[in-house]
Amino acid sequence: MSILDGRPALAAEIEKVAEVAGYLWEKGWAERNGGNITVNITAQVDDAIRALPAITESRPIGFHLPHLEGCYFYCKGTNRRMRDLARQPMQNGSVIRILPDCESYVIIADADVPPTSELPSHLAMHDYLLAKGSPYRACVHTHPIELVALSHNKEWLKKDVATKVLWSMIPETKAFCPRGLGIVPYMLPGSKELAEATIKAVDDNYDVVLWEKHGVFAVDMDAMAAFDQIDVLNKSALIYIAAKNLGFTPDGMTDAQMQEISRVFKLPK
Ligand code: 2HA
Ligand code: ZN
């Protein structure tokens, strides 16, 4: 028995996570247990789920997150592999309920698969998104090779340097990642500091944030949309690197061409 049985709306959300997990593995962005995905599934939760007993003791989140009371999340399991999650999402992830104290959670289904080591940063982000009235319900963290490579050079970490070059590689990138790439300097994985800096970057009006020498963190409506934003940015990084490998620095679209894209597609930046 799975919590997904007879619940097509909930199953559809988890299927998107599984599909994305497969793409992350195929792209080489998810070595071993790398990366994590969480989705706020509260809208797909019914009374029968709300009545389910906890299958674990309560565990601390490490943050007080007042907007998450009574919320439910699907979370990739800690130490679990994306390539396994792609085939068996409920054996490599679990559904958690946030308790009324807003600082602890229990697992309710399907089994005691403890959530990702990045749970504090993911849940703090979900809390921030709800507080802001954002419709975004998914957080995706992964290790895209070319974007991480760029983050090993200080020049690319200056505000909007990477955004401008990546947007200029192909018109679609600005259209489909219209807020660009925020930057967070290196911080310990799983730390509160990293969580807070990531929220600050999203608050600065980015949907995708580059963690120096580590990976990216993206937010969007669902796991697929968050993946798509990372994918278009990394595609641009690949085009830049391909041009460099041909022996030249790519011209990039002109400022006027990029302004035209913003005007025609009614983009926020
Ligand atoms: O969960 O990628 O940053 C594995 C990671 C932590
Ligand atoms: Zn990581």
Image: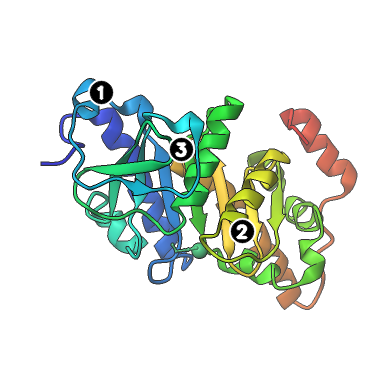
251 to 245, vertically: above or below: above
Gap between marks 3 and 1 measured at Cα: 19 Å
Q: Is residue 145 left or right of residue 3?
A: right
224 to 193, vertically: above or below: above
At 29% from the left and 27% from the top, the residue drawn is: 45
Dot 3 or dot 2: first in sequence order is 3
At 23% from the left and 21% from the top, the residue drawn is: 47
Task: Report the residue that reaches farthest toward the front.
Answer: 101
User: How many labels were placed on the picture?
Assistant: 3
The type of residue carrying mark 3 is Asp
At 37% from the left and 25% from the top, the residue drawn is: 43
Dot 2 or dot 1: first in sequence order is 1
Q: Which residue is mark 3?
A: 222
The type of residue carrying mark 1 is Asp
Q: Which mark is residue 69?
A: none
Quarter of the image holding residue 146? Answer: bottom right
Q: In terms of secondary structure, where does tag 2 sit?
A: helix
89 to 250, vertically: above or below: above
Asked whether 261 or 197 is in front, the reply is 197
User: Disc 3, disc 1: CB below 8 Å?
Assistant: no
65 to 81, vertically: above or below: above
Q: Which residue is mark 1?
A: 46
Front disc: 2 or 1: 1
Q: Which mark is residue 234?
A: 2
Q: Is residue 50 visible?
A: yes
The type of residue carrying mark 2 is Asn
The x, y position of residue 199, in whole percent, is: 63, 45
Task: Report the residue that reaches farthest toward the top.
Answer: 47
Quarter of the image holding residue 191? Answer: bottom right
The x, y position of residue 32, in whole percent, is: 38, 71
